[in-house]
Amino acid sequence: MNRDGQKRESELIKLISAEKLPRHVAIIMDGNGRWARKQGLPRIAGHREGMNTLKEIITCANELGINVVTLYAFSTENWKRPSWEVEFLMRLPEEYLKTELQPLIEKNIVIRAMGDLEQLPAVTKRAIKNALQATKDNTGMILNFALNYGGRNEILNAVKKIAERVQEGALKPEEISEDLFTRYLYTGDLPDPDLLIRPSGELRISNFLLWQLAYTELWFTRTLWPDFNKEHFLKAILDYQERERRFGGINKI
Ligand code: V0D
């Protein structure tokens, strides 16, 4: 980070109000492949660089005092990528946790994972299981990874579980409320995201947190995820606070 970057960063921090932080920030970590192509590097170099961005943003979110960060790491659509790329991606949780698990434990961070985790390769499941176990009693920020996740799939999964409860006679159809439905989603015990950040210039939700994003503020940037940094993150939060200041409470729609 150059001196100008440092300056802009400290200026942004001064403008952020600690009382009105988003409690839950969701991020689509997009643009790694495109970043690599632009640099004349293989796609996997983009994923590696994206991992460094991830470390910087987690540190920043934790220092600010955000309660939950949910990261779209692997979608149900991503299986369509070349097998060598999928195999590389599936080793990233292990690679990431090799150096980062200890620092995350020391920061009192809770690691969570959501999605159809059973279908992941054994090496991926083992790394994640170990991280969940090692941080389950922590009480700080929740770092929630969406892996083999799809929003429609999550909703169907909730519908099936609810249907089973109804069939057992444990639940009446008229008892199915928005609150009840929310609790059957992977994010059942988490607040809805206040802010969604999507880098890389795509202006879509792409099957991420469909139910949960109903009232979420959306923040887009053309910056690719490997080039995304603390400054972009702080700007997103500042813009969120500015929108809340203007529209908060009233005009919620
Ligand atoms: C690649 C940029 C960390 C986005 C970040 C399997 C695409 C790097 C994890 C991770 C990925 C997941 C679970 C966990 C700890 C770390 C990760 C994937 C991709 C998909 F408990 N980075 N990362 N997982 N990338």
Image (cartoon, grey):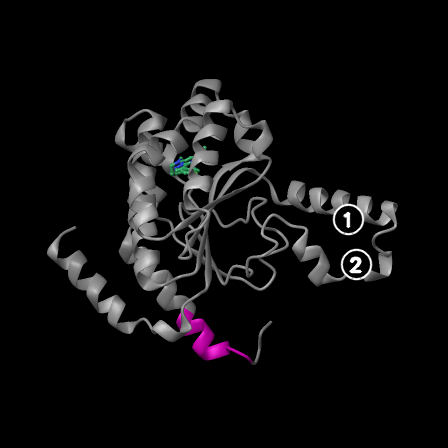
Q: Does residue 233 appear left or right of residue 180 in this picture?
A: left
The location of residue 165, given as percent across then percent down, is 81, 48
Say if 67 sits above or below 210 in the image: below
Query: Is the C terminus in the top left, top right, bottom left or bottom right quadrant?
Result: bottom right
Instruction: Identify which amino acid the numbered label 1 is placed on.
Output: Ile
Q: Secondary structure at mark 1?
A: helix
Reading the chain from its start, which is encountered first: label 1 or label 2?
1
**Is 245 part of what is drawn in magenta?**
yes
Instruction: Identify which amino acid the numbered label 2 is placed on.
Output: Ile
Magenta highlight range: 241-249
Q: Which residue is mark 1?
A: 162
Seen from the viewer's position, the closer of residues 40 and 94 is 94
Say if 153 sits above or below 14 in the image: above
Seen from the viewer's position, the closer of residues 233 and 148 is 148
The location of residue 16, given as percent across then percent down, is 32, 71
Q: Residue furthest left?
A: 3
Q: Is residue 228 visible?
A: no
Q: Whole-Å distance between the Cαs marked 1 and 2? A: 8 Å
Q: Are marks 1 and 2 in contact (CB under 8 Å)?
A: yes
Q: Does residue 81 appear left or right of residue 59 in this picture?
A: right
Identify the residue at image location x=81%, y=44%: 164
Identify the residue at image location x=43%, y=60%: 67
- Our reading of the magenta stretch's main secondary structure is helix
Identify the residue at image location x=54%, y=62%: 216
Quarter of image, res 61: bottom left
Q: Which residue is mark 2?
A: 176
Say if 60 sits above or below 55 in the image: below
